[in-house]
Image: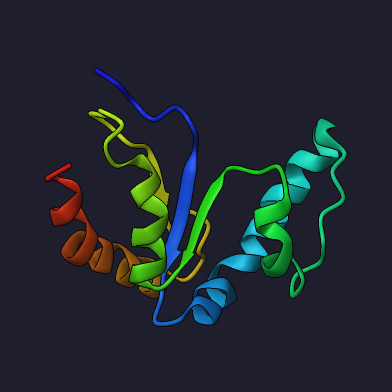
Amino acid sequence: MRIASVPIYGHIAASKEAAWDDYEEAQYHKLRFYSERGRGTVIPPVGELRHVNDQMDTQALLIGTVDDVARGLQAYRGKGLTHLSFGLSTYVPDPVKKRRSMEVFAKELLPEMKTW
């Protein structure tokens, strides 16, 4: 059994901008929490974080449209994984947006991923 050992988080919305609008503030608070407890990383404020998050030493973060998230997940295809830990919409506070993201993932991405 091969399991992806990196924490992968993501959120799906109608546009990349909308996905970041849903996710950014919670991502900021999560990163700030860990920074204050030892990492010491300077965390850009909400509004700027979405533009530099990929350059920071953080977990894999797949934020955007269903196509954006699908492209990000392709990195794990063909790796012989039997399990993949993916925290979908973990930090999105709005339950309606969280559920919508999960439904899109289940309908549009999961069937393809099952064939890997």
| On screen, residue 32 above or below 11 | above
| On screen, residue 41 above or below 109 | above
114 displayed left or right of 1: left
Nearer to us in this view, 94 or 70: 70
Looking at the image, which residue is at 49% across and 37% down? Answer: 7
User: Where residue 73 appears, x then y in whole percent?
Assistant: 36, 51
Looking at the image, which residue is at 44% across and 63% down? Answer: 11
Location of residue 111 by image quarter: bottom left
Q: Residue furthest front?
A: 78
Nearer to us in this view, 95 or 65: 65
Q: Quadrant of the N terminus?
A: top left
The total of numbered circles placed on residues is 0
44 displayed left or right of 68: right
User: Where residue 86 appears, x then y in whole percent?
Assistant: 38, 44
User: Where residue 51 appears, x then y in whole percent?
Assistant: 70, 69
Looking at the image, which residue is at 67% across and 50% down? Answer: 30
User: Where residue 21 appears, x then y in whole percent?
Assistant: 58, 77
Q: Quadrant of the C terminus?
A: top left
Looking at the image, which residue is at 68% across and 58% down? Answer: 53
59 displayed left or right of 19: right
Location of residue 101 by image quarter: bottom left
| On screen, residue 92 above or below 60 | below
Location of residue 12 by image quarter: bottom left
Colour mode? rainbow
